Image (cartoon, rainbow, N blue to C red):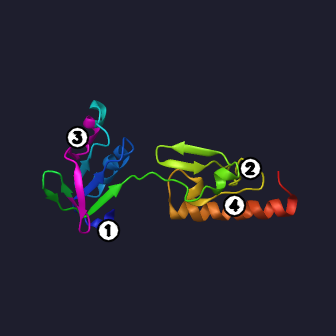
Amino acid sequence: GYELDRGPLGVLACGEISMHHALLIPEWGPTTLFLNGAFEPNEEHLNQLRERGVKIERKRVSEITGKAGVKLEDGRTIELAGLFVASRTTPSSPLAEELGCEIAESPLGLYVSTNDMKETSVNGVLACGDLARAAGNVTFAISDGALAGLSAHRSLVFGHS
């Protein structure tokens, strides 16, 4: 967020998970949480948001404009340096499920369950990266890929465990 130069920031709520972003990003600039009908903060949430200086916008978002502007249902447009969204993930292919791999669910979406060596619940099937994590991150995906490669090599040399 530092690259946004302390400009106004927004969080487009997708559910309670958006509280994480709303409480984190005020470090980078003044922040508005656009509830957009996704959830209603409880009293504890409201206190936390106030403590962090987060503005709450209850009007629904009708359009995202320009680089990161937000147009509201009442016609107002709020220009932002950046807009954050905590989206849910879904595997792009049904292959893991068709193979019988255990699928787990987190507040961020669905992912394939693996052990530390990226082995799934199905012998001989490995999963890594965003497919095997509740939250996507390029660095973690690279690390997971290296572990899955090591695990695959080990299974070819020593057989499946």
The amino acid at mark 3 is Arg
Residue that label 4 marks: 148
For mark 4, give the secondary structure: helix
- Could you tell me residue 8's position as x and y percent? 21, 59
Tell me: 49 left or right of 137. Answer: left
Badge 2, how many Cα within 10 Å: few under 14, some, many 20+? few
Q: How many marks?
A: 4
The amino acid at mark 1 is Glu
Instruction: Please tell me which of labels 2 and 1 falls first in the chain.
Output: 1
> Quadrant of the image for the N terminus?
bottom left
How far is the residue under mark 4 from the one under mark 2? 14 Å
Residue that label 2 marks: 122
Residue that label 3 marks: 50
How far is the residue under mark 4 from the one under mark 1? 33 Å
Disc on res. 3: 1
**Residues at circles 3 and 4 in contact by the CB criterion of under 8 Å:** no
Residue at image x 26%, y 68%? 67
Residue at image x 32%, y 53%? 25
